[in-house]
Amino acid sequence: MHIGYFSSIMGTKGGPAVVDKRVLESISHFDRKNTYTVYGLTRMSTQGLQLDNSNQNFKIKAIKPSGKWLGISFGLTMELKRHPVDLLHATFVAPPVIPCKFVTTMTCWSQYSQPELYPPLKRWRFLYLINRAMKNASAVFCYTEYLRNKVIDRFNYDPQRVFIVQPAVGDEMKPIEDKEMLNNFLQASGIEGPYILFLGVLTKRKNVEGLIRAYHILLNESKMEHKLVLLGEKGYHHQKIFDTVDELNIADRVVFVERRPHNELPFFYSGADVFVFPSFSEGFGLPPLEAMACGTPVVASNVTSVPEVVGDAALLVDPYRTEDIAERIFKYLTDRKLREQMIRRGFARVREFSWERAATQTVSAYEEVYQAGW
């Protein structure tokens, strides 16, 4: 079978891009039966891929015309007409016209449950492409049972055609044991002293403003010396986050760090005393697992897919209650026994996920779809 693999977000930052990259790399290490063409919106978008060089069944092709808008709207469609494949996997969004059998991936549900979190024009385009893909796809891949149930209910999908493929955390996510190297790295990044960490896009969906207000409660009600480190690129509606810091007069206690390369993230996780993930909506959420793999206790939302991912290895909170977030953070900072217990649970939880399993599940689903003739 000749499989096309298209990720419109390949080469960008963020969870779904990491998932696409790691699953594809893992597939290249074991699948010698099928052939693959990996399509990039530009030549640069696929440069970070580390495919198994010994596997001659993989080739990479840049779409022409290139670029996000032309590549999705016309480039891939034209390429598939010239050089057909047996099955295309469009992992994030699919072109409006696909001249072959294809599967797609549902990565999040906030575009349906909380559409106000997106700018109107981007929301319209996003929903148009997703809805069209869901109407025509042979099958859908989901990160979690939560997403799978949503897809089945909303689109009346046959459950047999909705597959769960869970992301994972790689071996690069581990505690930094060299404390001197860790401290030097953090100081060079503008971080000194103990801190609480958030990592993700600075946007309304991630509830960063709620975390800031919870942190302000902690400052007022305890003698906490910790700073709050917010690591990530600016997203939709980010200005309110900066305005909240100014409103609460805590600019000297909040450290903003631009999004960093993936291989640097273990330093930030390892140096934090608590990692907080108070998101309003997630399709999966890699950062809590990454923090657990680095030995950092996690506070996470009790909504959407998050509880399914973290299991019993995180303290769950109502993301709409800032007092709840503050209370759980304070527990970690004051209860050493609880910290140690949750760190152990975190290490165990991470071991339940693997990229190899995700890759195997993906290829198995491709073959099932193709053989079933869906």
Image (tube, grey):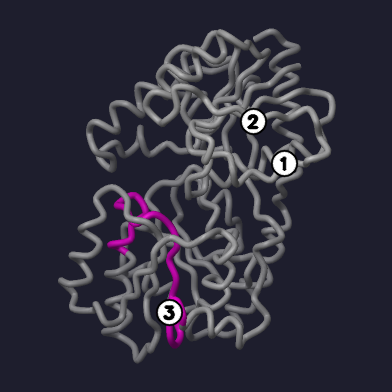
**What amino acid is labelled 1 in the image?**
Leu
Q: Secondary structure at mark 3?
A: helix
Question: At x 68% / y 56%, what residue is drawn?
Answer: 170
In the rendered image, which residue does mark 2 sit on? 60
Question: At x 67% / y 68%, what residue is drawn?
Answer: 174
84 vs 259, left or right, is right
Instruction: Determine which of the numbered discs, if any, sits on residue 112 in the image.
Output: none
Q: CA distance from mark 3 to mark 2?
A: 49 Å
In the rendered image, which residue does mark 1 sit on? 51
Location of residue 316 in the rendering, given as x and y in whole percent from the top left corner: 48, 62
**Taking 314 as reference, is 43 above or below it?**
above
In the rendered image, which residue does mark 3 sit on? 330
**Which numbered disc flags the more N-terminal residue, 2 or 1?**
1
**What amino acid is labelled 2 in the image?**
Ile
Picture quarter with the C terminus = top right
**Which numbered disc flags the more N-terminal residue, 1 or 3?**
1
The boundaries of the magenta stretch are 188-210
Circle 1 crowding by C-alpha within 10 Å: few under 14, some 14–19, many from 20: some
Discs 2, 1 touching: Cβ within 8 Å: yes
User: Within the magenta stretch, is there residue 192?
Assistant: yes
Q: How many marks?
A: 3
Q: Nearer the viewer, residue 358 or 265?
A: 265
**What amino acid is labelled 3 in the image?**
Phe
Location of residue 131 in the rendering, given as x and y in whole percent from the top left corner: 40, 20
